[in-house]
Amino acid sequence: MNSIVDELSDTAVQRHELKRKTFGSVAWTLVRIGTDQGFAFLVFALLARLLTPHDMGLFALALVFAEAGKLIATAGFPEAIIRDQTLDSELADTLFWANLAFGTAVAAALFASAEFIAAFFQEPALAPILEALTLIIPLSALGSIHTARKLRDFGHKSLASRALASGLVGGGLGIYGAYAGWGVWSLVAQRAGMEGTSTLLAFGAYPWLPGRRISLRRLGTVLAFSANTMLTQVLWLAMVRCQDMVVGRMLAASSVGIYRVSWRAVDLLTQFAVGPFSTAAMPALSRLQEDPPGFAQAYLRFLSTAALVAFPTMLGFGALAEDAVPLVFGERWQEAGRIAQSLSLLVVPIVVNALSGPTLAALGRSGTVARLALLQLLATIGFTLAAAPYGLETVAGAYVLRAYLTVPLQMWVLKREAGIGVLPVLRSIAPPLTAAFAMVVVLVGAEPELEPWFPNRTQYLLTAIPCGAVLYLTVLVLVGRRFLAGQIKALHSIVGR
């Protein structure tokens, strides 16, 4: 009897320690995103005012291939390191050198393909930009294993300071280049500065020098898991950015620039509101693989907390996007504001997507995640091809429609693989979704009445944002008292002990 009590006590202590580490990870990830993405967004906004839609579109097209190359080069190794509970020096050495070799090979292949890619989009200026961006692939590979080992130990604090430093260096180069008249090359300089600084600081954050203990047998074992993870990441990237490919081919590079600016505004809010939870989810859930009740409880806590932040943030932005986007990026981006308004409706699929991937990966179901991503990619391509002849706003609407049509499938997969039912999921997100929807209805309905009082749109935005926050909290208190009480209790159990 005493042994059972001791075992239960040990389990409770372990859960509390995991909660404490996870809370710290979320907090420091929020700091990192606040500094990294916040500063990057300011730099992006300034560059958007200085550069043309064609410049932004060319860089966006080239960056799709460079980012895909980075994901292929890492081969899912960072996620394998985070998930592995018995990491040793031989495995770390093996994955470091394999990552660097893959990065070099992918960069060489992409460099050789640059002219063909440029010809496909009928944009000759695209080739040299893509050739330059291939250099960041092996550069990034040098630091990815160091970063993964730091994250494995919940080292999100050092990652936050590293992100700030790389953002400062890269942003400074980009702004200097834009003012100096470099055009699209200022964006290339920004990316190179960020990647170079990040890699240097990765060695400082985790002071480890790889040895020469390489095991092809262990590499093959890891690839059995990590290849699916890598494929999934490439598919998720393709799912979002395949629209750029279709728009670039069927419309123009300048249209890609407009679409990217609208997505950049939405992406900043996504990173801020959802990113900390999706980043912390995998290491936390991986440690609960053998504890199904604890696993389900942790997932639902991640989901409800992400919804609490994301729903009002993104839907509130959507209600104000037509004024906010041109104000931040400049009047030439008026169309991007209307597109961003449509994309803000993606908030529910975004929250579900952001957590379902890490959750299934923590259970070792990377193949399931890959198949789900492939299905969504194919659907996105089909919807986008059908919508592109009708303009960018139709393309955005088609993407939103596709996202909602695949949410039930994700819920079914979650139930099958993790045993988490649809009703608990809906209960976890219903109160904040209801409150956010009510907030948007009031903001949109009141705007025509308030417009004569605020002829200056900046003044209107500065008034509407705090009013929207008060509306959201008021409705949430009215309809979700138990929900709020649960959130407060969970937070107190972590920081109050």
Image (tube, rainbow, N blue to C red):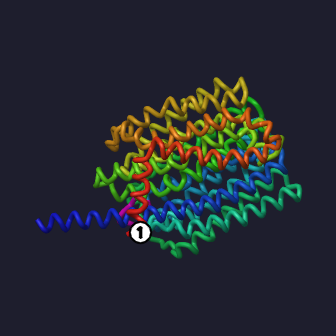
Q: Position of residue 184 (x, y in %)?
A: 81, 50
Q: Is residue 86 magenta?
A: yes
Above or below residue 254? Residue 150 is below
Query: Residue visible at 79% across and 54% down?
Result: 46
Quarter of the figure with residue 423: top left
Where is 60 relative to 437, above or below?
below
Q: Nearer the viewer, residue 443 or 231?
A: 443
Quadrant for residue 394, please give it: top right
Where does residue 358 sit, x and y in percent of width and height?
45, 50
Residue density around tag 1, few if under 14, some if 14–19, many if 20 or more, within 10 Å: some
In terms of secondary structure, where does tag 1 sit?
helix
Which is more toward the observer, 383 or 34? 34
Numbered range of the magenta stretch: 81-89
Residue drawn at x 34%, y 38% is: 421
In the image as oriented, which residue stretches furthest toward the left?
Answer: 1
Is residue 244 left or right of 27 when viewed as pictured? right
Q: Amino acid at mark 1?
A: Glu
Depth check, front residue: 77 or 29: 29
* Relative image position of residue 7 (x, y in whole percent): 20, 65
Residue 390, percent from left and from top: 71, 23
Q: Is residue 182 above or below residue 475?
A: below
Return the residue at label 1: 90
